[in-house]
Amino acid sequence: MKHKGILIVVSGFSGAGKGTLMKQMVRCYENYALSVSMTTRMPRPGEEEGKEYFFVSKEEFEDRISRDGLIEYANYCDHYYGTPREYVERQLERGKDVILEIEIQGALKVKRKFPTAVLMFVMPPSVAELKKRLEGRGTESREVIEKRLKRACEEAEGIEQYDYIVINDALEECVKEMHSLIQAAHHAPVRNEEFIEKMKKELSELK
């Protein structure tokens, strides 16, 4: 019996390494599809259109909102971020587990629309390590780094609404842990209602 894929929402403080984790997940395991978000921010050095993000104007993004073409969207550090609907729904129907890498506002919106989605929050082992990683990027000003650290304080208030907390200390171990949690989620009763009903029916026929 072919199972529909499940939606995995991954969030985390900026600098926690969630982007690296997601790329490694897709590289190591076949059944994941990484959704590409849309944003109105400018590309960082090395980022490619359609790979890291779809980079669009504010007007184009708002047009997509008006046509219900996004599963979720949010404003983060003065820019829009959102998840295009068509790609995600197509991959789920194919049986792929779709990973959305989005921030906390969007994640909670997705959970309301897709109650069976699995929400994971990626954290560094310490705040000192978080600051070190942000500074180590070398792509952002001191002002932007401070803004991201302030944002992390705000986001910490919503972490308890996630299903799992994942500490990104060692990359390979973290990837294995996330994969194990997702595989376990496939066996939750809420995702196997059709099979459960089939078994109940067959059992009742034995009486």
Image (cartoon, rainbow, N blue to C red):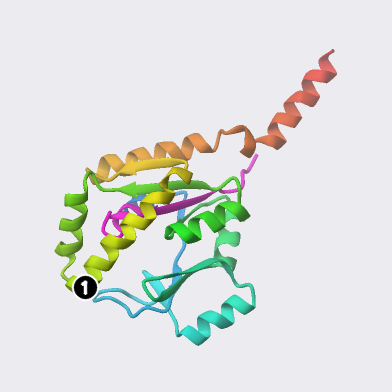
Determine the image quadrant of residue 93: bottom right
Q: Position of residue 117 (x, y in %)?
A: 55, 48
Q: Position of residue 92 (x, y in %)?
A: 58, 54
Q: Is residue 93 above or below residue 71?
A: above
Determine the image quadrant of residue 3: top right
Amino acid type for the residue under numbered disc 1:
Glu
Range shown magenta:
1-22
Q: Is residue 191 above or below residue 135?
A: above
Residue 12 sits inside the magenta stretch: yes
Question: Which residue occupies 42% across, 52% down?
Answer: 10
Position of the N terminus, as image quadrant, is top right
Question: Which residue occupies 45% across, 85% down?
Answer: 57
Question: Which residue occupies 44% across, 82% down?
Answer: 56
Residue 17 sits inside the magenta stretch: yes
| Front-lying residue, 69 or 160 | 160
Report if residue 29 is visible in the image. Answer: no
Using residue 6 as the reference point, say whether residue 47 is left or right of it.
left
Report if residue 206 is visible in the image. Answer: yes
As helix, strand or loop, the secondary structure at mark 1 comes to: helix
Residue identified by numbered label 1: 143
Q: Position of residue 124 (x, y in %)?
A: 25, 48
Position of the C terminus, as image quadrant, is top right
Using residue 3 as the reference point, say whether residue 143 is left or right of it.
left
| Front-lying residue, 81 or 54 | 81
The 10 Å Cα crowd at callout 1, few under 14, some 14 to 19, many 20 or more, is few
Question: Which residue occupies 37% across, 78% down?
Answer: 41
Q: Is residue 147 above or below residue 116?
A: below
Q: Position of residue 134 (x, y in %)?
A: 20, 62
| Front-lying residue, 123 or 23 | 123
Using residue 20 as the reference point, say whether residue 103 is left or right of it.
right
User: Quick one: which residue is furthest to the top in this view?
Assistant: 207
| Front-lying residue, 14 or 43 | 14
